[in-house]
Image (spheres, helix red, strand yellow):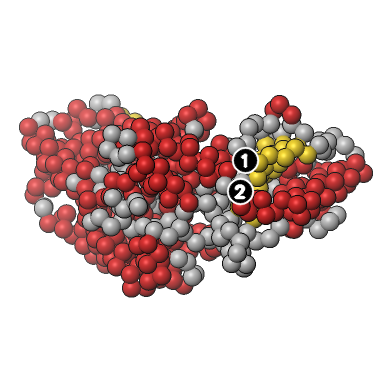
Amino acid sequence: MATVTEPTASADQPVLQRLSTLDRFLPVWILLAMAVGLGLGAAIPSINDGLDELRIGTVSLPIAVGLLLMMYPVLAKVRYGDVARDRSPETAKLLGASLVLNWIVGPALMFALAWIFLADQPEFRTGLIIVGLARCIAMVLIWSDLSCADRESTALLVAINSVFQIVAYSVLGWFYLTALPDLLGLDSQGFSIGIWEVARTVLIFLGIPLVAGALTRHIGVRRMGEEAYETRFLPRIGPFALYGLLFTIVMLFAIQGDAITSEPLDVVRIALPLLVYFAVMFSAGLAAGRLIGATYARTASLAFTAAGNNFELAIAVAVGVFGATSGQALAGVVGPLIEVPVLVGLVYVALWIRRRWYPAEETAARRGDPPTPRADPRPSDPTEDPFMRHVLFVCNHNAGRSQIAQAFFDRLAPDDVRAESAGTQPAKAVWPVVVQAMAEVGIDLSAGKPTKLTTEMQLHADWAVTMGCGDACPFVPAMVQEWDVKDPSTLPIERVREIRDQIEGHVKDLLDQHLNEIRTDRTAHQLRLERLLPAVRKDLGDRFSEHQIRACSDQVLAGYDDATVRGHVMTIAHRDVTECLTAGNCA
């Protein structure tokens, strides 16, 4: 379910106060849109004929515009690059549980509930099944923040669902609407649907905005940077999702006025299975999180991702396949009316569960302790700095020298120091001759993927090593070493072996001579702080003193000193500082 703004307050505030005004009153806006639509239909009885004059397939052009408008901002928000980034075992378990809940349990449960509650109403039943197939990709980001879930995990699960819907939705639609009822011998009252009918609608109303959203994100981040894109651009386009949804609801209710006013209890019948569905899926998500040993934050991400649905896509499919006057379209419209108040209630349930089931995390959150790393253990020596440190290896293509250096560093370094590598102009793959040379020493780089150097990587590095790129190497705001190592891309295997051994020696020297400096370096933290302060001053400088802003920013950034270098630290920290200062929780 799409929405428009991020909550901007502390977790100690009541949940409703942490919702933006538009989100908090979303059921009210939907009810008003319904009322306007009913009034419009009564005032202009011929509106349906007018809307039918311009059509895209089976959908009138005005409704099609509304459907596309409400999908685009949602899909511009998804971090598609997150899909391939985090490959830790904990994340693999989380993704596995999410895929099972979202694409096996969820659709099957909605199929069962639809047949149990609406066996005599094939149109409403079909509409609910369509809703069950559409997995949440937007509003869940709000529920995640309100329930103090893991933002990055939620973003990852949303990205997976967005991509998976393109691939799986039409096949699952045909299976649950046609194949499975026939297999079970259920009386579908002559109703059936072809796979292409659903696929065509998904390609139009999900495919077009998905491509547009992905391109917008790629171009926007490239031109203005991740932080500006997330904190300035997205809030500007976000409201259009709500505008599109409300416009679509007005049109649908204008067309369906007679059917709705003559049978008002139909809305209640549609709402009942939805209530059961939300409760069961949320509970299943909590249980799955406990089963895989996830933290509360990741468990909450899993539970809300499983419980929510993408009603924009469900409405688009229902209207596109069955028409705006269909019962299927009405079932899709009832969805967001029920979802918002129910999931607000589940946020309260999640926070209560954190107090009961995860007391250590609750206590840490109340104290404002920094988050515990997900996979890498803390140093065993209590005299060592307790935060993860990062060494960044940089060359032109990230296909040879920097990949070799990262591989040897990962093999030789202690657990509290992590390596990353990147290039200013990354190649498509690691050079084959490098893969061959590293395989000889037991390191497999065949699956390595060259990565482009980002501002976030530069800001997060505690130590950096550049290799042979001269003036093309960007400024890395940390302690920087230059290793004079030749590019192995065009050299024979004998020379590449020499380069491999040379880099291994450099890595050993780095660890022997500079490990303590890497562990105690605060350059990255201070530079991130200086980069964060101007944005916070601009937003809050008229309300808080320089001392308050600096102290709170320093405190918040300290909590992310051990975050992965690919994390969106600056974006998240900016949001956290705003919440902390606004709520008066910063020391």
Picture quadrant of residue 241: top left
Which residue bears the numbered disc 2?
521
Q: Is residue 281 visible?
A: no
At 61% from the left and 61% from the top, the residue drawn is 384
Q: Residues within 10 Å of mark 2 (few under 14, many from 20)?
A: some
**Vertical position of residue 530 compared to residue 338: above or below:** above
Picture quadrant of residue 460: top right
Picture quadrant of residue 452: top right
Give the percent coordinates (x, y) of residue 536: 38, 37
Left or right: residue 20 compared with residue 199? left
Left or right: residue 158 compared with residue 274? right
Seen as rendered, the residue at the extreme right is: 494
At 36% from the left and 57% from the top, the residue drawn is 148
Give the percent coordinates (x, y) of residue 1: 32, 47
Left or right: residue 542 compared with residue 206? left
Left or right: residue 508 compared with residue 207? right
- Considering depth in this image, is 71 or 190 the residue closer to the camera? 71
- For badge 2, the amino acid type reads Asp
- Considering depth in this image, is 89 or 411 the residue closer to the camera? 411
Determine the secondary structure under disc 1: loop
Which residue bears the numbered disc 1?
478
Cα separation, mark 1 vs mark 2, equals 9 Å
Q: Are marks 1 and 2 in contact (CB under 8 Å)?
A: yes
Q: Is residue 117 visible?
A: yes
Q: Residues within 10 Å of mark 1 (few under 14, many from 20)?
A: many
